[in-house]
């Protein structure tokens, strides 16, 4: 960089937290690490009186439950966000609204690099399918039992199928297709850069400092 930012980079979490805790400003820990380390990271942050924003795709339900119990006991806030993209959240909310009116749905996602997106189907696609499944609807009844691999992967037991395309040049995109008699309704979200996470991250940091328990999902603040 042409000009240094004068931001210290330290690989000792305890040292970082101790340094920040001595500041007059309110510190927030942003965790982009790994599902296996999240619990200990939040526990350390809480010990220093700091709240956490956790953006770790594929975090386990058991880990979220343990964190929730810990935060309740400590009266310390924590936000666990499956996604920080506001556009992705709006897509999920639109899909939930549409699901009450259609019995057929499929998810199509794309990515440019398979070496980067090794978690296909993506966390976003899994979350959308989970949200739709929680509504008690059975989708694609005429096709739910097929075992043809080309028909995509069924997520859960509610018939929601997801198709993942990976080709160089494709944008990171998610489209949810619904269909009914004589019509097709689709909602789509494209990510063109990691900058898309920043507005959601800033919102999360501003909101988490007021929490005294764990909140799951950035959509709670939209």
Image (spheres, rainbow, N blue to C red):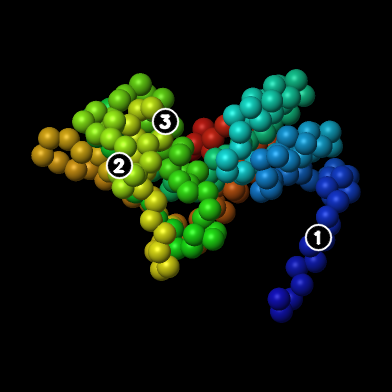
Q: Label 2: which residue?
A: 148
Element marked by disc 3: loop
Q: Label 3: which residue?
A: 156
The picture places residue 34, in percent across and down from the top left corner, at 68, 45
Element marked by disc 2: loop
Q: Residue at x 69, y 28 (%)?
A: 67
Residue 9 numbered tag: 1
Residue 176 visible to the viewer: no
Q: Which class describes the residues within 10 Å of circle 1: few (<14), some (14-19), or many (20+)? A: few
Quarter of the image where one finds residue 155: top left
Q: Residue furthest bottom?
A: 2
Q: Residue at x 54, y 40 (%)?
A: 82
The picture places residue 9, in percent across and down from the top left corner, at 81, 60
Residue 31 visible to the viewer: yes
Residue in front for this viewpoint, 70 or 159: 159
- Marks 3 and 2, Cα distance to the nearest angstrom? 17 Å
């Amino acid at each position: 960089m042409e000009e240094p930012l004068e931001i210290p980079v330290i690989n000792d979490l305890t040292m970082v937290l101790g340094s920040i805790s001595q500041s007059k400003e309110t510190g927030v820990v942003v965790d982009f690490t790994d599902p296996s380390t999240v619990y200990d990271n939040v526990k350390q942050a809480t010990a220093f009186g700091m709240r956490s924003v956790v953006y770790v795709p594929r975090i386990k339900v058991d880990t979220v439950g343990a964190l929730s119990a810990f935060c309740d006991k400590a009266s310390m806030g924590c936000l666990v966000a499956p996604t920080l993209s506001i556009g992705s959240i709006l897509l999920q909310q639109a899909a939930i609204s549409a699901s009450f009116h259609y019995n057929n749905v499929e998810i199509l996602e794309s990515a440019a690099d398979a070496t980067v997106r090794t978690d296909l189907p993506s966390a976003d696609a899994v979350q959308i399918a989970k949200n739709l499944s929680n509504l008690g609807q059975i989708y694609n009844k005429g096709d739910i039992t097929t075992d043809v691999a080309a028909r995509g992967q069924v997520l859960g037991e509610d018939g929601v199928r997801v198709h993942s395309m990976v080709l160089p040049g494709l944008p990171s995109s998610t489209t949810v297709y619904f269909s009914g008699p004589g019509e097709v309704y689709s909602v789509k979200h494209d990510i063109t850069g990691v900058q898309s996470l920043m507005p959601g991250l800033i919102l999360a940091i501003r909101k988490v400092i007021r929490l005294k328990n764990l909140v799951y999902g950035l959509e709670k603040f939209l």
